[in-house]
Image: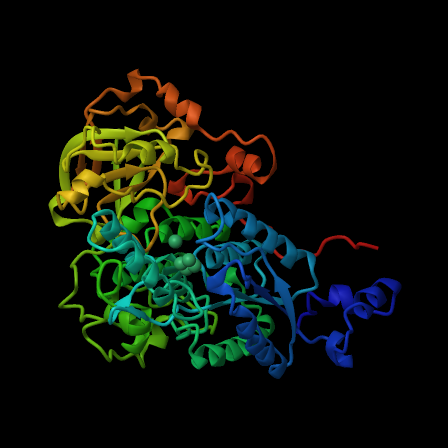
Amino acid sequence: MAPRRSAQWYAGDDRNSYIHRAWMRRGLPSDAFEGRPHIAIANSASDLTPCNAHLGEVARSVANGVYEAGGIPLDLPVVSLGETQVRPTAMLWRNMAAMATEEMLRANPIDGVVLLGGCDKTIPALLMAACSVDLPAVVVPGGPMLTGTFRGVPLGCGTDVWKLSEEVRAGTLSAADFARSESSMIRSRGHCNTMGTASTMGLLAEALGMTLPGVAGIPAADSRLLEAAHATGALAVELVDAGRRPSTVLGPGSFRNAIVALAALGGSTNAVVHLLAIAGRAGIELSLDDFDRIGADVPLLVDLQPAGRYLMEDLHRAGGLHAVLAEVRDLLDPLAPTVTGRPLAEHLDAAAVYDREVIRPREMPLQPRAGIAVLRGNLAPDGAVIKPAAASAHLLRHRGPAVVFDSVEDLHARLDDPDLDVTADSVLVLRGCGPKGYPGMPEVSNMPLPAKLLAQGVRDMVRVCDGRMSGTAYGTVVLHVAPEAAAGGPLARVRTGDLVTLDIEARTLHVDADLDAREPSPEFLAALARPSRGWERLYVDTVQQANTGADQDFLLGASGDRVARGSH
Ligand code: FES
Ligand code: MG
């Protein structure tokens, strides 16, 4: 067996190995430094990331599994991002969290790592880090919340917030009842229980092959999650012994499987940006068009909010990810491996569906074509995305006059103005919400509808934005317009009244105007973020556009697990 990476700290009798060992003893068994694999548990638990607050308990189970298999488990707290808490958007620090995790894994005497995430950005950041440091790595997704109920019916995190708040604005739900629903919605530990970004990325971590098969989607409060965490700890030791790294597990086939899963599950549009970023770290060629090419014709099989009715607990009860993947097995790469060393496809043999309302058979899908559609045109030369499954049928092909907003503040100031010249046919355009513009590419693209139209019963309109949309939101919303307005994209030059044409079938987004002949609006330029220092400045200076994953240019690729020069 090749010498452990950690042996470069601990082996030998010299002063430096003495220092490395002595400070780490703290009751560890005496043979801890004699070749046992040292496994970091990269833990994004934080009280300020409520979705991940329970991961300390999961980490204890992982640690037990590591010990049992002969390894030494080591807690490594990592940057944590609470989707609902941090401003302006958790996305501003996804790359920073990935960078900090990568650097700390490389700097320390670590042979392998178990990655604990849950809330939206945490699993993507951990996977990006793992690819760039390329140590043996495995994810334990923290799992979704249990289903909460309000007035006797299930309440989905996120999705129902949008619905209930629109009801309040439309005057059909009292403010007191709205407030009462709060404590019903967040029923237990875990992340949002709709098919939002957290659920999607936990499931896609497994589709990529980066989890113990069968773990993704186990509710956070379910004891089976701790069992799986225990087994994952043991697996981490096996990964080190086998030298099985992200670079051995991940290949183009893994991303094909993730894209197929994304469509069949009806997953979040945010997964597009995250998968592109992960592929960018892994050095695997993946483009926006691959999502359309591989995923567009995949049927939607899972009836979960926001596209459908049920919640993550139901998906798990109905058979979980494997039952879904077994339905589309012929579309998967049969050889794409997992951390077990066996192909993902082989792990599907025992899959069974226990509730056909939640997981549909292939021949009776919820929608025949569920993937992400990639749009292009003079408004989005480098592409934009839309999730047809979350869009209204009558708007799939639409032409209407733009109503342009220069910022989120501008939108909120004018949207409910009774004099705003807007009808159900208008196309709401919001700019300045891309990676550089906001900065951080927030989830503001699912603009609320004007109050006067809501009062008329309008529930959806075509919206176009260079930002992202919460994975728990819905509507006919064109997202991730690239290049963004703040990077000189044509979105900066569209004007109120310009006719915009969306044709999802034709994959086009066009505006009837010679945008090249125009200058960006001065109001828009004035509203742009220009951070002068700190991470924000580094971020704005180096972030790439959504169509390639919105990673920093200097973080693409990998540096591997090389051991740096000594510190003493
Ligand atoms: Fe954390 Fe939704 S807020 S997953
Ligand atoms: Mg979100």
Q: Quadrant of residue 344?
A: bottom left
Asked if 449 appears above or below 265 in the picture, the reply is above
Report which quarter residue 490 is drawn in.
Answer: top left
Given residues 260 and 314, the one toward you in this image is 314
Q: Quadrant of the N terminus?
A: bottom right
In the rendered view, does 316 fall on the left or right side of 539? left
The count of marks equals: 0
- Establish if 288 lies above or below 164: above
Task: Name which residue lies at 59% across and 80% down.
Answer: 64
Left or right: 410 in relation to 246 = left
Q: Residue furthest bottom?
A: 68
Residue 503 visible here? no
Residue 458, position as x, y percentages in the image: 15, 44
**Colour basis:** rainbow
Q: Report the quarter where the C terminus lies.
A: bottom right
Q: Is residue 15 left or right of residue 545?
A: right
Q: Between residue 11 and residue 367, name the one nearer to us.
A: 367
Lateral position of residue 4 relative to residue 326, left or right: right
On the image, the x and y values in percent for residue 46 come to: 55, 61
Which residue sits at x=27%, y=37%? 464
* Residue 158 percent across, percent down from the top left: 33, 57
Q: Residue furthest left?
A: 394
Q: In terms of depth relative to the viewer, which is nearer, 385 or 7?
A: 385
Q: Which percent across, then down, holds residue 234?
A: 56, 78
Q: Nearer the viewer, residue 347 or 408?
A: 408
Indicate the quadrant where residue 65 lies: bottom right
On the question of residue 346 being in view, the answer is yes
Image height of 310 relative to 531, above or below:
below
